[in-house]
Structures are given as structure tokens and as C-alpha cells.
Image: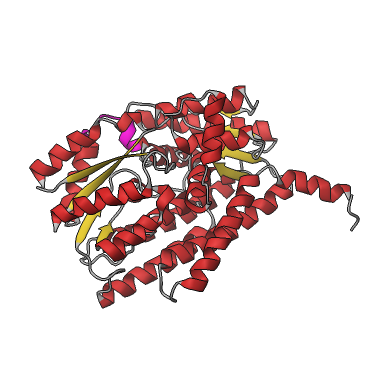
Amino acid sequence: MKKNDPTMSKEKALENRIIPYKMLLEGVSTTHALVEGILPEHGIPSLKIGLENLISLLKDLIQKAKEGLPVIGHHFSFPTEYLYCFDCVPVCIEATSYLMAALLPNGSEPYYDLITSYGHPFHTCTSQKGTMGMTMDGLFKFDAIITPTAPCDNTFASYPFFKFHENVPLILPDLPYLKAEKSIPYYAEQLRLGLEKLGKIIGQEPDYNKLKKAIEIQNKVHEYQMELFELKKVIPCPVENMLNPMAAAAAIFMAGRPEILTFYEKMLEVAKYRYNNKIYHGNEEKIRSIWPYMIIFFDLALCEWLNREMGMSILFDIFNYNFSDPININSDLDKLFHGMARHGLEAPMVKQSAEFYYPFIEDCVHLARDFSVDCFIFTSHVGCKQFGSVAQLLREALKEEVGIPLLLIDVDVGDRRFASEKVIREKIKLFIQTLL
């Protein structure tokens, strides 16, 4: 093939619409090679299995971009599987920022700084700021972006950037604040209108049979998630801490695809084997913790350090204890969209932010009892203003109702410059000394 082949040049230009995914593929592949080469055969299976499936996914999406399929950005509270009613390349704005923070040497920090220097407030959420900076730097070329009007003010403040600065069509299904039965048909209609509008922008009709197939996969995943959830009640916990961030990545990047089924099938096998043989991923389980908000994405090694050095299990974080009922795909479209709407209103962070904090606190108290928990660790993320006041209320409730303490860590879960790995680990280490 000639060097100046116009076909090759066109394919390269199309592929380069998602340069951050090419960066992620390199980072994921390098990390996977290290895992394979350094760790023992059974070391951190969730990391190994998760990375294998991420490699498969990223390669496929890069190829689809190369073929010219539209690149569709979306907020994590708009489930990725819903976009598979189109032939497209879905890109989750928030997940991209934080997976890069987890895997690349400088994370997403250069892009946080780029968008901050443009004038976007430094205290807004880095989950959006990273991808905003990448887009400003020409690394993403979106054909359209779709996001519900939720779950926080950062969404309202950040997403208009793509429309007004980058001229990307922005679709905003209105997610009601009122969490009530009458909100379901309203949001169902908003989802349907949003997908239809998106289809007109990219020149495709929504294929609801494809959508049902993607949702069918997620319904099966729900079964695996519930089994793993129940297994975490066992002492010692048969699931390693690393499953939490890897499951969060799977829930967004792999949703609606065969890779997510492979990931959960294999992880369930590992958990059942450990359960049957009373195996703990570490020397000894000394402390059982729940992180009711987020894992620290820029330091995934923290998960392994807690397991092996501190004997602390992270039973789950916010992305791993919120489950909604499977969606009925065997009825008419109205019921399908009603199920999708209910699922969206129960999504992590949407569920907690779309009402007052009482249900969140009640859920935490019940989880503490049901899972024999010794403590909670609350990561107060600088971008999540809507959760700034809940930590003290939760601390008081846990002390009064269950008699366990809560550690509060002020952090930016995607930017180590706010609070470094050293500072965070020292706080946790001192906290653990009070428990033993």
C-alpha cells in the first residue's frame, strides 16, 4: 500500500477521533502484561480478568471508530447498553477520565489543568474535567453527547461546554428530582425522545431489537452480581477488594456486551471456590469495611494494600451495592422504557442524589448489620457538593444504631494532588489502629 494512500489517511483520521481510547489500550495492555509477568497464577484475578476484557473491548471500539461509526459521549447515569440500539462507539465521559487516572503515569491531570486554565472552576468534578480537557485538546471528536439532567450540579455546569465550546450536539433527557411512581412514565418518555433525537442527529433509526439484546445481557449480569453480593456476607470475604473498581469499569465500559458476561462468570467461579475452601485474598481478614461513596481511582493499588497489608476487606463501594430489578424485554416498548426509566432512577449516585439523605443512611445502617461490618470509610470527593454534609449524619447514625465508627477522608478521587496516596494511607493506617 502506498504511503500516501487516501483510504489509509481517512481511516487514521476516523480512528483519531478517540485518541484517549488508544492511550487507554496501551495503558491497559502494559498493565496486563505486568500482571501476567509478575504476579503468581492466582494473583488478583479480578484485575487480570478485567484487563483482558477491557483490551478486547477497546480494540473493538477503536476498530469501529476507524470504520466511521459515530462517536457518542454519555454520562455514566445514562447506561451504555441503551446506546446499542445504534451502530456507534459509546464513550462514557466520566469513566474515561478516571480509568486514565488509574492506569496512566500522569493520569488525567494534564487535562484537568487544561480545562481549569480555560476557566472552568477547579473545584468541579474531575470525572468530567478530564474528558473536557481531552476534547479541548482535540483528542476526542464527538458526533453527539447524551446525558440526563442528573445526578449533580457538576453535570449541569460541565456538559454545556461540549455544546457551546466544541459545537457538539447535546441531548438532555430530563431526569425528575421527585423520586415517585409518577416519575417513571415521565422519564421513560424522556429516554425515548432522547434516543429518537440522537438517531436523527447521527442518521440512524433506533433498533429496539438490538437494545433488547444488550439489556438481556445486563439482566444476566444482574444474577451474577446478586450472587456475589450474597457471598460477601461470608467471613472471611471470598471476594478481593480489587473487584470493586474493576466491576465499576465493567458496568460502564462493557455494559451490554459479551465481555461483561465473561468477566462476571469468571469472578463468580473464583468467589465460589474461595467460599468453599474458606480462602481470603490476603493473610487474614481483620476488618470488614464499607465505602459508601467512591473508591480512590488514582490509587487502585490501595485495594490490594488493604487486603494484604492491613487485612481490611472493602465489601463494596457506591458502584457495587446499588441494584435495580431486571428490565422486562418481552413486552411492548412502553413497558421496556418504563423498566429502563426505573433502572435509571436507581442508578448509583442518581438514587442517592435524587432525594433527601434518609434512605441512603437507612441503607447504610442495614448493610452494616447484614454484612457484619466493622467500620465505614467515606471519601468526601471535592466535586460532589451534594454529598458534603451527609458524612456527619451518617457517622452519628452508624454510632447510634450499629456502634461502629466512620473515617472521613477529604479527597479528589481522580487527582492525587488534592490528597496523595501517602496521606490517604497514613489516615487509614491510624484509623485501623483504633479498631484493633
Q: Position of residue 363 (x, y in %)?
A: 22, 43
The image shows a total of numbered marks equal to 0
Quadrant occupied by the N terminus: bottom right
Residue 349 lies left or right of residue 400; in this view the side is right
Whether residue 334 appears in this view of the structure is no
Please, is residue 280 above or below residue 77 in the view? Answer: below
Q: In the picture shown, does residue 13 fall above or below 273?
A: above
Q: State left or right for residue 120 relative to residue 229.
A: right
Q: Quadrant of the C terminus?
A: bottom left
* Along the line of sight, the residue nearer the viewer: 241 or 409: 409
The image shows residue 373 at horizontal and vertical percentages of 18, 54
Task: Give coordinates of residue 96: x percent, y percent.
Answer: 53, 44
Query: Where does the magenta region start and end?
Result: 351-358
* The one of 141 and 365 positioned closer to us in this rendering: 141
Residue at x-position 69% and y-position 53%: 63
Indicate the position of residue 197 as horizontal and vertical percent values. Answer: 60, 30
Write the residue at 47% across / 40% down. Answer: 76
The one of 141 and 105 positioned closer to us in this rendering: 105
Q: Residue at x 58, y 44 (%)?
A: 90
